[in-house]
Image (tube, helix red, strand yellow):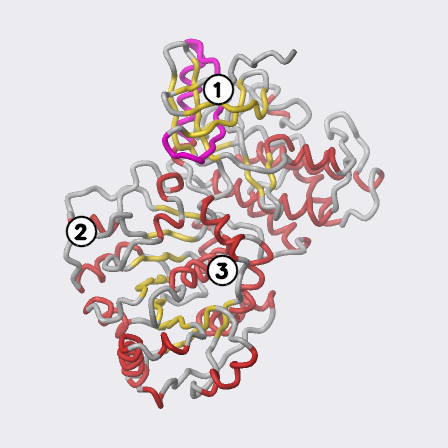
Amino acid sequence: MNQRSPWNNVIIGNRYQLISLLGQGGMSRVYLAKDRKLIGKRWAVKEVDCSLSDSASFMEEAEMLAKLGHAQLPQLVDYFITEQGKGYLVMDYIEGPTLQDLFEKKARHLTVDLIVHIALQLLDIFHYLHTFQPRPIIYRDLKPANVMLNTHNQVRLIDFGVARQFKQGQASDTMQMGTVGFAAPEQYVGGQTDARTDLYTLGSMLYYLLSGGQYAYLNVKPLEQLRDGIPEQLRSTVNLLLQESPQHRCQTALEVKQRLQLLDPHPLFHDISTSRQSSHTASSHVSDQLIIIGGLFAGVGSTFTAISLARIFHALSIPHALVEQPTIEPDLYMLLYGDQHAPSSYSFLSEHMHDPSQAITPTWKNGFTTWVPIPPDGYQGSWQTADAFKLLHLVKKPIVLWDISTDWEHPAVQELCYRADRILVVVDASPGKCNRPSSRRHLEQLMSYQNRGQNVHVIVNGTVPSQFKKEWHEAWPSAPLCTIPELPRSEVLQANWKGDCIQDRPPYLHAIFKAFYPILGEIVPNELLMKWGKPYKKSLLNWFNRHV
């Protein structure tokens, strides 16, 4: 007879109902829970026994997680300590195996390509943590069991129970914590841990994965004696990371990444975290640009186009912002699941325009992308042209993507279009919609911008049926600059429900990147695109003359 688990259907925080046990360690348990308020939503709930000595460390972990804003790190949505002394962290539920699970399933043999691909993503995450302000965060417990993978081999780093904020000048840590087999030497002898400690743990994990499960601290054999076909660059990097003295190791995550990135079979696909150091090189080659993105008619996909461009710029390490025009119907905040993914106490920049006394809270960043949505209930103030330029000044990014939907006729939008470096108009192959009175008015406006010398480009969202392609293209003086491929609707909806950008998934990012090559060649210097091929440029369109 099955015995009922003591936690089964227990409700905590008057909201979260525990369903199953996902995992446990010596200090905590992680449960799957369903939300009784948001029906259908599931969360991962970490339970910690908080004695008088443990409550402070629990609160430190919770407050640290609340500050983080990276797509590959846990998104904390709630935390509390009960009267019974139990601490709970409520986080995104991430479906998928851990790296340890995959390693065991594959009989402890993963391909070198996959191992390098995972390592580069972890280095991006470490760079984000190690350059976090006001103080760097040291993770300290990297191991395969703390790395989760989705179906596209994208990494999520979990369990920040032993992470700490680095304190300059401190001789040693308050507590030496880590996992035996992966921890760095300084974690055993009472030394100060820093970014180089995390790099050592990465070296330990790489040795473990490449050797079929052997621990570096127990085995003195070099990797070439344990496995054939490991590139010398990878072997030498692992050896550097495993140096006992921190000053003899690689010193930063970027340094390690530079050594490994040429080995990555998918250089465009791994996420790159926000950093002043890494972004400086890319942004210094990109001139400041304002790019207006709008649809010729409603529902054509201007926001999808804007997000797609944003995630391409993210992959290219170019800092940028995506601004949602305050006068349009709100969409971006909901698409990104802002209630979960926006920083704690996030306030909208458009609201600051309406009420200057309102304090500006930390920006909402996802890698190199800064999201600037409007409130989900819409902007309630009166939006003036001066407000648009104030907002543009506040954003301060090399590239600003401004999604206007179909609000071409708003005075502030018209003024932005006059000042814009590029105007992208999104259309699809619906002949009736192109001939609507509003569409024809928008065309007249766009033609006036082009006649003034503005760079106006047409982007087609979706393919044109082959039997109508010739007739449809002949309606334009020249072919549209880009055609966005159709993505599986079920995959798009699934990503939307999770608050994810489907554009971040490797196969779709690759397809969208190829589709946007012509416009990228107009925006990004060739040297930034050379590793993916020579950008293709087309002349500006002089389109729909016969209909205007």
Q: Is residue 114 above or below residue 194?
A: below
Q: Is residue 381 left or right of residue 519?
A: left
Residue 514 at what x, y percent from top left?
A: 56, 68
Question: Which image quadrant: the N terminus?
Answer: top right
| Range drawn in magenta | 37-64
Name the kind of residue labelled 2 in the image: Gln
Closest to the observer, 270 or 127:
270
Pick whichever of labels 1 and 2 is earlier in the sequence. 1
Q: CA distance from mark 3 to mark 1?
A: 43 Å
The image position of residue 545, as x and y in percent, is 35, 89
Q: Which residue is mark 1?
A: 9
Residue wearing tag 2:
380
In the image, which disc is placed on residue 312? 3
Residues at marks 1 and 2, CA–CA distance in whole angstroms? 42 Å
Q: Is residue 426 above or below residue 373?
A: below
Closer to the eye: label 3 or 1: 1
Separation of disc 2 and disc 3 at Cα? Answer: 32 Å
Q: Residue at x 36, y 44 (%)?
A: 338
Q: Does the magenta-highlighted stretch encompass residue 63?
A: yes
366 vs 256, nearest the viewer: 366
Q: Is residue 204 visible?
A: no
